[in-house]
């Protein structure tokens, strides 16, 4: 991470290569290592989302699909006393062989951020 990067996100999975049907653990870390606090505001109780797309860009899975979220405003404050928020999910479906793009999204209405990585299923 660049020394100048004081806040942002990091997306990771527990492996880079998986067997078809193997559980994929996906982690989105939102961080603020600056001396100032940053408020992230949300339109609902949802804070994050995760998407898996095949090599053609077709959405294979979306974590939030079929889930209900309370329609209420919310916030998450990150700063010196609370510098990180970590959101972790498991994908338990079966992917065909090939490469997939995994995207993690912070759904804050005022500071939306996302990051993607590539995994392989062998």
Image (tube, rainbow, N blue to C red):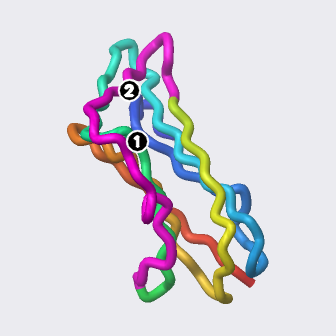
Q: Position of residue 58 (x, y in %)?
A: 42, 83
Residue farthest toward the left in the current orientation of the protein:
110
Residue 116 visible in the snapshot: no
Location of residue 61 with respect to 50 vertically, above or below: below
Q: Secondary structure at mark 1?
A: loop
Residue 99's place in the image compared with 50, above or below, is below
The reply, left or right, for residue 16 in relation to residue 69 is right
Q: For residue 26, which quarter of the picture? A: bottom right
In the image, residue 45 lies at what x, y percent? 37, 38
- What residue span does the magenta drawing correspond to? 57-84
Q: Quadrant of residue 118?
A: bottom right
**Dominant secondary-structure state across the stretch colored magenta:** loop
From the viewer's side, name the closer residue of 28 and 32. 28
User: Residue 76: which numbered mark, if any?
Assistant: 2
The circle drawn on residue 47 is: 1
**Residue at screen point 62% across, 71% down:** 119
Where in the figure is residue 73, as x and y percent of width and height? 26, 32
């Amino acid at each position: 991470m660049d020394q100048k990067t004081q806040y942002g996100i990091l997306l990771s999975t527990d492996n880079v290569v998986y067997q078809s049907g193997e559980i994929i653990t996906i982690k989105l870390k939102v961080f603020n290592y600056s001396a100032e606090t940053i408020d992230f505001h949300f339109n609902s109780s949802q804070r994050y989302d995760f998407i898996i797309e095949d090599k053609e860009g077709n959405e294979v899975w979306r974590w939030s699909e079929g889930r209900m979220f309370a329609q209420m405003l919310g916030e998450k404050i990150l700063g010196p006393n609370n510098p990180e928020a970590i959101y972790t999910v498991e994908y338990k479906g079966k992917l065909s062989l090939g490469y997939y793009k995994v995207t993690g999204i912070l759904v804050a209405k005022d500071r939306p951020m996302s990051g993607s990585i590539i995994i392989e299923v062998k």
